[in-house]
Amino acid sequence: MSDQHAELKLFVDGAWQAGEGRDTGPVFNPATGAAIAEVPLATAADLDAALSAADRGFRRWRDTDVETRAGILRKAAALMRERVDAIATLLTREQGKVIAEARAEVIGSAGVFDWYAEEAKRAYGRVLVRPAGQRSIVLRQPVGPVAALSPWNFPVYLLAKKLGPALAAGCSVIAKPPEETPGCTSAFFRCLLDAGLPADVCQLVFGVPDQVSRHLLASDVIRKVSFTGSVPVGKHLMRLAADGVKRITLELGGHAPVLVFADCDLEKTLDMVVPQKFRNAGQVCVSPTRFHVEEPIYEAFLKGFAERAKALPVGDGSDPASRMGPLANRRRPEAIEALVNDATAKGARALAGGERGEGGYFFQPTLLADVPLEADIMTNEPFGPVAVTRSFRTEDEALEQANRLPYGLAAFAFTENGRRTNRLGDAIEAGMVGINTFAISVPDAPFGGVKVSGFGSEGGSEGFDSYCVVKAVHQA
């Protein structure tokens, strides 16, 4: 067991709670498959204590002046930057991503806190026009205690995107990060406590996901749920939230299309899309996956993509020479292999990769060409290092393919035609569209999907608003 993982604990009602008397779950290093720690799993009593603290903490935090709340977020961001190497090392060891990406995730999380520290000061209301002597005002107030449920692919950043706006708005939070990555999320959480966050304002629990979510959502204390994860789990949480008429924000799966037109700068486009496809081993909800390429450049695109994919250094994420690490858990290589085998059995050509790596949870960077629509991977998000490609002839055909699936999280296009960029921005059915760019997840912009990819946004003023309720006060 790693010394850095020796003291994994829950943080409940102002105290770090170890594993005594609790079930535990193993934590694995994806690069080796070896167990490196045991994480304590919250009991029903732990969750009840967390709910009681969150209820009490909310009443304290909502009345805390905005400058104090903002100051704590800014100090936490500064501590994250000071501790970036330690947090990133834990993140790579638990999740597998290369160390440069882990560092960028931690720094990006600090940026989220900084942005919401300022946004906290802009919870403006308005005054309505009324006859002399009367007043009607509209206020924005914190919604209440929040259950924040975050996934393993960006365990620090996606937790920051929930905690930043919730705390800025004046909400208390019970955070349940993924059990796969307890060390890095605990280290991130300690930055908040060391920055002066009152101990009853934010709780940190790990546990059996279904048991934790059922328990928290059944409580009248919880007023809002924020979840990032799969479509099936999102639907399940919607049903649970409905019983208490709880506000919910869902950022669910995607299967991002990429439309590559013949007028793009092909070499520049390839230099952008290949690193993005294999970032975090493809375990990115907005990862470019379905590449629809205009016929005149299709073969050249395949050749350039395959060359770059084959040359990508793959290895333990802690090795600075690695550019792609392993998949995050033992389930993923088998799932990816099944999708690739199904596609090739139905006629797809494997131009790069297509097989598992040696040891750990590795899978080769993979390019599939001429993938038929009936292949499972054309409908089901691979969430791994696999790019699937098809050619198209017309813009209408490309748009039809982009919008074919029930997903609508992110989409991308590469073209130098200005009129076309306007048409694509209007016509593509997605919550986020990147044209000649992949920079779509930034603190000041909304991040969210449409169709079965969820609803509501994280990021931007929209993310802040999701943690507020509106109250009208009328005085005669």
Image (spheres, grey):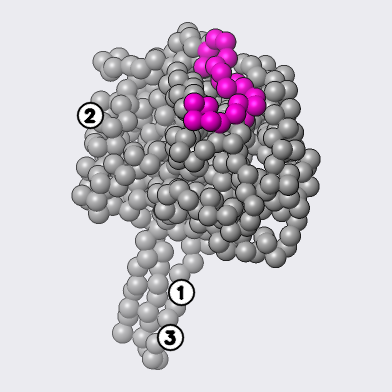
Tell me which residue sits at (32%, 78%) in the image: 474
Look at the image and give the residue range highlighted in magenta.
Answer: 344-367
Question: Overall secondary structure of the magenta stretch?
Answer: loop
Identify which residue, 97 or 130, lies in the foreground.
97
**Badge 1 is on which residue?**
126
Q: Is residue 172 magenta?
A: no
Q: Secondary structure at mark 3?
A: loop
Q: Secondary structure at mark 2?
A: helix
Q: Amino acid at mark 3?
A: Val
Res 210 quadrant in image: top left
Q: Is residue 35 above or below residue 175?
A: above
Left or right: 374 with respect to 387? left
Tell me which residue sits at (73%, 44%) in the image: 297
Local packing at callout 1 (Cα closer than 10 Å; few below 14, some 14-19, many 20+) is few
Left or right: 199 with respect to 377? left
Q: Is residue 392 above or below residue 303?
A: below
> Disc number at residue 129?
3
Identify which residue, 140 or 475, lies in the foreground.
140
**Badge 2 is on which residue?**
44
Q: Quadrant of the C terminus?
A: bottom left
Q: Earlier in the sequence, mark 1 or mark 2?
A: 2
